[in-house]
Image (cartoon, coloured by chain):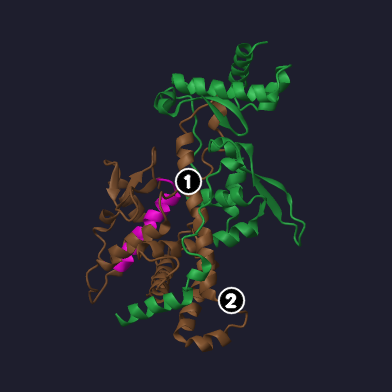
Chain colours: A brown, B green
Amino acid sequence: MENYNTGYEVKLEMFEGPLDLLLHLIKKNEVSIYDIPIALITQQYLVYIDLMKTLNLDIAGEFLVMAATLIHIKSKMLLPPSETDEDDEDGEDPMAELVRRLTEYKRFKDAAMLLEERESRWRDVFGREESFKEYGPPEAEPTLFDFSLFDLLDSLRVVIERLPEKTAIEFTSEELSVKDRMNIVMERLENTQSISFDSLFENDKTRMAVIATFLALLELVKLRLVRIQQVKEFEAIRIFKSEGAELNG
Amino acid sequence: MDDKEIKAIIEALIFVSGEPITLNRIKDVIDGADKKTIETLASELKDEFNKEHNGLQLVEVANGYQLTTRPEYAPWIKKLNKIKLASKLSKPALETLAIIAYKQPIIRPEIEKIRGVDSGGVIKTLLERKIIKIIGRMDIVGKPILYSTTPEFLQYFGLKDLSDLPTLKEFHELKEEEIPVTASAEASNNQRETA
């Protein structure tokens, strides 16, 4: 994948790690944690890494370490079993180790979901004290997305893949800046409550344009001017204007 | 004092304390009633509240008893416009919190080993919201900080105590000796490549 330089860097804090991405891919491909088609998953994993690089997202080193691990496992599997055994100096099977890490992490992810359910239920219960629910600053950590960043990247990939074949000349001089695109998105949200993710890219005919619009969206999310929501996993994503949001300048 | 009177006193104490009040605290106040009696009466009181289905309920939370509103009346309470709700915890925060809750006391490298990603920012948020706390340092090189959950954690999630946490799901469906990890992954790998 080519590296587009939009001259714009979005420093979006990545809270999700390589294990999240792997679990996302395992779920998306409907395969078992215990039976990972390593070639397929490795290939898809690397596509995401490329996409994140293209977007200039601040990729944590852990993502690259995991990429190396996947490639190592894949290459080991191409060797005959006997050689593989000798090859293993520390005696640890990296695939078994990966499965162990994924299952361990998944247990806590599931537990976190149960906690989330309890949180929702308990938020509707009030004690006599008004301060009952006030723990620290209310804006301590706004949830930027109600779903994983990887769902968002999935949607972006769909948009990129739908682009028409490359025309001979791309009129890059006419490209709108990320800042312009931020204004356009906010204008579109002026008279409506929400717009679909896909419709954001209606006028973008090149990869470069799509990526610039996407960066504009991330920047707006970061500035808390818009919220991105997905009603159900793997379903369409919509962009909502935050209450009282106004883009200055 | 007969039981009826003690029960009335318990109700009054729970009402006035606002926050969860422990059985021991109640016992300290009511001289001459043993803990077992108080526990039985508090439990009866809880059942009565539930049976009558008033706007209030008596719940066991954070190692104590508390009078709260019933969740179904939340819309009206919010309309009163007096309640300031803290924002919900993000998924990474909940995940980190789950690890701390089940493995406490725990140091940050252990959390990050499980999550596979830097968790410093999330831990800071949880500390600020008083859902976790620092309880000391581990006696190893670098003396890393040990984290644990707080009573506010129990209250935030409506948990009676730590044993009230949902059981961690074990991946028992497949025991280790039944997982032909390398072989099967390789098989499906080949399958896909030939396909």
In the picture, the quarter occupied by the N terminus of chain B is: top right
Residue located 42% across and 54% down the image:
A219
Q: Is residue A43 above or below residue B167?
A: below
Residue located 62% across and 22% down the image:
B17
Q: Is residue A136 above or below residue A127?
A: below
Which mark, residue A92? 2
Give the image quarter of residue A65: bottom right
Near mark 2 (Cα within 10 A), the count class, few <14, some 14-19 or many ≥20, is: few
Separation of residues labelled 1 and 2 (CA atoms): 33 Å
- Please state the horizontal and vertical placement of residue B171, each as a whole percent of the image: 50, 59
Residue type at numbered disc 1: Leu
Determine which residue is flagged by label 1: A114
**Horizontal arrangement in the rendering, residue B4 relative to residue B183 (left or right):** right
Q: Circles 1 and 2: CB distance less than 8 Å?
A: no
Say which of A107 and B141 sits in front. Answer: A107
In the picture, the quarter occupied by the C terminus of chain B is: bottom left
**Horizontal arrangement in the rendering, residue A75 relative to residue A169 (left or right):** right
Mark 1 — on which chain does it sit?
A
The stretch of residues the image draws in magenta is: A206-225
Residue B54 visible in the snapshot: no
Q: Is residue A35 above or below residue A248?
A: below
Q: Main secondary structure of the magenta part?
A: helix
SS of the residue under disc 1: helix
Residue located 27% across and 72% down the image:
A170
Residue A176 included in the magenta stretch of the image:
no
SS of the residue under disc 2: loop
Mark 2 — on which chain does it sit?
A
- Please state the horizontal and vertical placement of residue A26, each as a whole percent of the image: 40, 65
Nearer the N terminus, badge 1 or badge 2? 2
- Please state the horizontal and vertical placement of residue A85, each as a whole percent of the image: 55, 85
Residue type at numbered disc 2: Glu
